[in-house]
């Protein structure tokens, strides 16, 4: 490397894409060196071992397929929290520390920075999950003498979508929050809403529309509202990708009729509307990934970085 | 050619105007010192030039490009040391240089850059989180020169630097200026500005109160002086009497001493006569010629109702601000 370029500073040798990638790469390098990420990988590997052992020790016949189902449950706790931890400090943290001011002294635009952070954070989580699932292959072989490779691959893909959904949400929050504290508070509240309060919210929506609490067969639009929950969408998307027995892990209060009405009531015999198809759940996860980030971006573009 | 121009630039936060109708012109090739006490609005002005902050009113151009509308064109041509910046703790010095080079699409002579700001090759391999404040600041200064920018915008570049670091900075600024770059550099310490800048703008309370060459300001300064007298007994109302004299701009009275600042050295005898006429014995007299700092002082603490005041400040009071 020699400083032999022409004296003109406006060399403009980069494009929006390369600048976003430079930000994303920096984000990855920075994350890889953090103790948070090492801890996260350790927890994920531990959880994988626990899931596989749990499947071996449960009443049902131990099988690599059951182990995948148990792993899916545990991942629904770890992955959203991990995505929020990694994602919600990206912009808010740099804004608070002042490194964003250094970054914006260089060439990238605000859009490129948000996009780069998004790419980098998703890349970090995808790689982390990749390590976890690759680790699960020999583990499964060691414990069961067999590997449910299709289910494991399907779950890996679905879980990356789930991670993407929560990263998108966390980056959106991070772009809007003025400080780390605000960002963490908002992102954690969002997580609480999704895990604890979604059912009351859905039931409340039913009450607001019909004047009664849901009872008996639920209208399709209400099921769709429930499906908008990323954990619900995760379970459905796993089904669409070919992993049959993934259950959404969240708190329910039986407000939607018995608490078992997770799936579309099939007693009516009518075909469910297309928007309740499992495949649509994949779009819902992608929506969670993109929409909050885009909202955050619109906000971030016009905010004062003082 | 104009490097920086602002017209009626205003930024309000609620009722408070951080800067108020600022008209600033910096020519290409200038090494421009932007001075003023803390809170005068220096960083706000620079933040607007960088589009970190959007103005409430007025406009700004940098190298002929609109600071708000043509941000990219501006960024590609400038090197920036912003106020309140931070580097990435877990990246090494060298990684910062590569990051900045990649971002702006220029190749960088890393060894030369490190040498200019006094960061050793060994230190460059360590994460920036292990650097001292001064070392970070020197690395950040080096990063501003990547790609040979046409304009360097440095906000309080001397903060956190030891005397050796300040000397390195001044050397770097001179070299960049010799290369043909414009340097815009803010500080609340006039000494740091004086030795490298050819023009100075003084900002106080969001307004530009002076803009001149160093020589021009020094000419003002050379004409003024301070008279310090030990007096006995202290006459009543002597401060008001002194304040009415021609060329007196500040009077400070304690139990036994009177300190009078004048804008004209020739006013000294009149000052001493005035004290004697009031019936006091002048036991001792010391006079000091005004420094550039005192001119700065006079501009930035001047009351709004005129150049004269009987309510003098304690000597050195400015440093407490």
Image (cartoon, coloured by chain):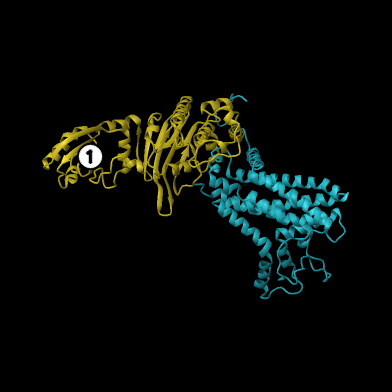
Chain colours: A cyan, B yellow
Identify the element where label 1 is drawn: strand
For the question of whether residue B100 can be seen, the reply is yes
- Residue at (50, 31) in percent of width and height: B150
The residue lying toward the viewer, choosing from A91 and B136, is: B136
Report the residue marked by disc 1. B259
* Extreme residue in the bottom direction: A212
The residue lying toward the viewer, choosing from B122 and A236, is: B122
Q: Number of labelled discs?
A: 1
A225 in relation to B17, above or below: below
**Which x, y percent locates residue B42?**
42, 41
For the question of whether residue A240 can be seen, the reply is no
Quarter location, residue B275: top left
Considering the image in quadrants, where does the N terminus of chain A appear? top right
- Residue at (48, 33) in percent of width and height: B152
Q: Is residue B150 left or right of residue A218?
A: left
**Which x, y percent locates residue B92?**
60, 34
**Which x, y percent locates residue A249?**
73, 60
Quarter location, residue B223: top left
Q: Residues within 10 Å of mark 1 (few under 14, many from 20)?
A: many
- Residue at (26, 47) in percent of width and height: B305
B163 in relation to B19, above or below: above
Chain ID at mark 1 = B
The residue lying toward the viewer, choosing from B131 and B96, is: B131
């Amino acid at each position: 490397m020699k400083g032999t370029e022409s004296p003109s500073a406006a060399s403009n040798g980069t494009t929006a894409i390369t600048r976003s990638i430079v930000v994303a790469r920096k984000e990855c390098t920075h994350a890889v060196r953090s103790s948070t990420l090492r801890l996260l990988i350790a927890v994920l590997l531990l959880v994988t071992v626990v899931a596989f052992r749990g499947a071996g020790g449960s009443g049902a016949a131990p099988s690599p397929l059951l182990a995948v189902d148990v792993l899916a449950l545990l991942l629904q706790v770890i992955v959203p929290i991990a995505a929020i931890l990694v994602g919600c400090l990206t912009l808010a943290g740099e804004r608070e520390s002042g490194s964003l001011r250094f970054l914006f002294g260089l060439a990238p635009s605000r859009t490129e920075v948000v996009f780069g952070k998004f790419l980098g954070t998703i890349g970090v989580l995808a790689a982390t999950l990749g390590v976890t699932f690759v680790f699960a292959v020999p583990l499964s072989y060691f414990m069961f003498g067999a590997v449910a490779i299709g289910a494991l691959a399907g779950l890996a893909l679905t879980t990356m979508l789930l991670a993407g959904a929560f990263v998108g949400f966390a980056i959106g929050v991070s772009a809007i929050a003025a400080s780390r504290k605000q960002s963490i508070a908002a992102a954690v509240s969002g997580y609480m809403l999704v895990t604890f309060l979604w059912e009351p919210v859905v039931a409340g929506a039913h009450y607001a529309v019909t004047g009664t609490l849901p009872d008996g067969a639920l209208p399709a639009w209400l099921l769709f509202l429930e499906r908008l929950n990323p954990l619900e969408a995760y379970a459905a998307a796993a089904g669409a990708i070919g992993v049959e027995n993934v259950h959404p892990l969240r708190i329910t209060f039986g407000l939607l009729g018995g608490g078992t009405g997770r799936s579309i009531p099939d007693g009516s015999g009518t075909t469910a509307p297309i928007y309740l198809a499992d495949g649509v759940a994949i779009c819902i996860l992608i929506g969670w990934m993109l929409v909050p980030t885009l909202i955050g971006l619109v906000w971030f573009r016009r905010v004062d970085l003082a | 050619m104009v490097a920086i121009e602002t017209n009626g630039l205003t930024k309000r936060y609620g009722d408070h105007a951080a800067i108020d109708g600022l008209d600033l012109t910096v020519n290409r090739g200038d090494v421009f010192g932007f001075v003023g006490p803390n809170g005068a609005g220096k960083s706000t002005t620079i933040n607007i030039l960088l589009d970190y902050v959007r103005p409430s009113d007025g406009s700004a151009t940098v190298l002929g490009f609109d600071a708000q509308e043509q941000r990219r064109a501006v960024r590609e041509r400038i090197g920036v040391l912003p106020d309140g910046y931070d580097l990435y703790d877990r990246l090494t010095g060298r990684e910062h240089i590569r990051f900045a080079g990649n971002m702006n699409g220029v190749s960088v002579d890393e060894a030369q850059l490190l040498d200019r700001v006094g960061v050793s090759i060994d230190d460059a391999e360590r994460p920036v989180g292990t650097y001292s404040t001064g070392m970070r600041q020197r690395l950040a200064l080096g990063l501003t020169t990547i790609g040979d920018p046409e304009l360097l915008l440095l906000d309080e570049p001397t903060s956190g630097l030891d005397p050796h670091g300040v000397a390195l900075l001044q050397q770097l600024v001179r070299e960049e200026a010799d290369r043909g770059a414009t340097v815009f550099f803010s500080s609340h310490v006039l000494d740091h500005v004086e030795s490298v800048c050819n023009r100075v703008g003084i900002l106080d309370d969001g307004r530009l109160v002076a803009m001149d060459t160093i020589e021009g300001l020094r000419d003002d300064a050379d004409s003024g002086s301070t008279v310090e007298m030990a007096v006995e007994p202290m006459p009543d109302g002597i401060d008001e009497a002194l304040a009415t004299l021609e060329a007196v701009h500040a009077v400070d009275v304690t139990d036994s001493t009177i300190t009078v600042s004048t804008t004209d050295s020739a006013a000294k005898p009149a000052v001493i006569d005035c004290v004697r006429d009031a019936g006091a014995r002048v036991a001792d007299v010391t006079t000091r010629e005004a420094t550039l700092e005192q001119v700065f002082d006079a501009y930035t603490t001047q009351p709004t109702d005129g150049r004269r005041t009987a309510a003098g400040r304690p000597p050195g009071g400015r440093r407490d601000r």
